[in-house]
Image (cartoon, helix red, strand yellow):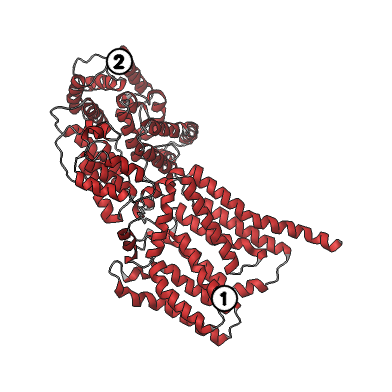
Amino acid sequence: MTKVNSNKPQELYGRIVRFIPVILAVLLWSLLTFDNHYYLKKVEDLSLFMFDSLFLVEWFKTPGGFLGLAGSFFTQFLHLPWLGALLWTALLYLAYFLTYRILRIPDRLRLLALIPVALIVIGNMSLGYGMFIMREQDHFFAPTLGYICSLLPLAICRRMDRNLSRILLLALWSIAGFELLGVFALSGVLTAALGLVATSGYTRKEGVRLVGIAIALVLLVPVMMYPLYVTYRMATSWSMGLPTPSVDSWTVAVRLPYQLSLLFAILSAASAGRMGSASLTFRKEITVQVLALAISVVTVWGFWYRDENFRTELAMSDAIDNYDWNKAIDIYTRTVRSHTKSDEKAYRDRTAKLKEVTNADEAADIVDRYSKRFFEPTRTMVLYRDLALLKTGQALDRCFTMKDGGRPQNSRTQLFMATQGGKMLYFQYGLVNMSYRWCLEDVIEHNWSFGTLKYMAMHCIIMQESELAHKYVNKLSKTLFYRKWAREQQALESDSLAMATSDPYRQVLPYMCFESRMSNDVAKPEVYIMSHFVDEPVLNPTPEYATAALYFAMRTQNIPAFWDHLRTYTLTASFDKLPVSVQEATVLYNNLEKSNIRIPVDKAATDRYDSFNKFVQSHPIRSLRESSYIYSKSFGSTFFYYYYFIRNLQTY
């Protein structure tokens, strides 16, 4: 009886350990579905899968093509984030289970099998802005599928009795597998050879020969098969099948987690025999398991990309793609409000530090160090917000009352705004030819995607190029989740009246009252859009166009352009009285130029300007960065604050 009781803690411990991976899978699915909803949708938007024979054949032009095809197939289910997250989580759990079983990790150390899974999770969720540059259509699911497939040769070889059969299988797997799975097949060959030597009773000579054959296959097969392809360089042969098989320095970190997961499998296979025979005390087993669990969880949490501005950009982009302008504005507003207390604390801490120094250089250094603690939106966030405000007719009333800025991207490498949101911004502002130009650029650089096809189709429909429109819509009709949208667009291809009254065309057409043209935007949509509205002469502007032109004249702080576009706005737009920000700009510019242009403004606007001047006298501005917060507390919702403090912002 005493002996049975002594085993109960170990039995309970064993049950808990077996249940931990299930708990982690549920937590991961919840985190993906509810906290990374927009990230998953953007991954799907940047991918493509069509039920089309030509599309399927295209994948086999490079090694690892089948893996890419399978990855693209699963990626389309991220259109429904809960479903895509469920599929990926299930595959990750399968990867964990096969690691534990095939690599023969002892039951008492089974949580070691979480480590390669954690590495795969890191690979996907640490990308951040890199997702727009890398743009592999299959990157989210393909490495997981590839890792699972890399374990299969070892499982199959163990069921074979003859050594010659095993060698033939590894040879066939390396040749056919390199075409289908790329480097994952080669890794599987090495994993199988080392695993067999470790657990199948090979003599030293036989083991050395088998491992030597495996290494030779890994080294020679890519070299022998290279002449069969024309789409990649020899230097990337041992990266095929991995995301971004590029030699650019920033891509090394993208591939590293997946390479480490394969290395873990290789080393685990080589040490399978030792792990199985190792004698560990119960306390040491617990220590190893807890350490493996801690490494997996802490590593995933530490490398998970959680930049708030990036997440806000994705959420706003999704709202705009669905023409939910108010949602985009609300997302921006909530993000700004969530930092009110932290900004106040940063100001108090900085003020306390500044009181301790008298040297101007030391004070400037403190201001620089504390600047990152204050919330500041990216330019992409601001452009998305401005677009939404213009579409809802609120831009001139609300835009200059909201926080502005230009926080640099928290990115491994520079990402141009044109690559991230150029297609959408240009299209929504009526610059549909520029939108189409960046769609073509996207296709050349990164191949087709759902998002690109949609904007190309909408461009052709609004320009009444029915033949081209049919081509793009037909492609989307062969997809799983865009068939309904494609059918709706087919009805608009030849019906211009129906097109003009449906979204998004009815909201874009009012901005197309200019002579269509294309020119070089130097990959900077913000500058191009502002220049277009401020500098392009338009004979018969619509109220929407006149509003945008006036707004961007205020945005660029171009005083002569402001007066010109204000005149056009008053003749074109319908309003009871001038928006508050326009009144403030009128008061400010009249005083700056000592002019007397008679525009009716409320007494409240002149009173605010007087209050601002009195505040300047009592709170001298030593530097814009240092004084901006205290001024924003009292005048952050005025055009005066925007004019003096929002300067020298860098677009990209």
Q: Residue furthest top?
A: 603
Q: Secondary structure at mark 1?
A: loop
| In the foreground, 409 or 570 | 570
> To which residue does mark 1 refer?
158
Q: Residue furthest right?
A: 1
The answer to whether residue 298 is visible is yes
Looking at the rendered image, the disc whose residue lies closer to the viewer, 1 or 2, is: 1
Amino acid carrying label 1: it is: Arg
**Which picture quadrant has residue 395?**
top left
Q: CA distance from mark 1 to mark 2?
A: 86 Å
| In the foreground, 40 or 552 | 40
Q: Secondary structure at mark 2?
A: helix
| Residue 606 image label | 2
Amino acid carrying label 2: it is: Thr
Residue for point 60% across, 62% down: 112
Q: Is residue 242 left or right of residue 295?
A: left
**Mark 1 or mark 2, which has the lower sequence index?**
1
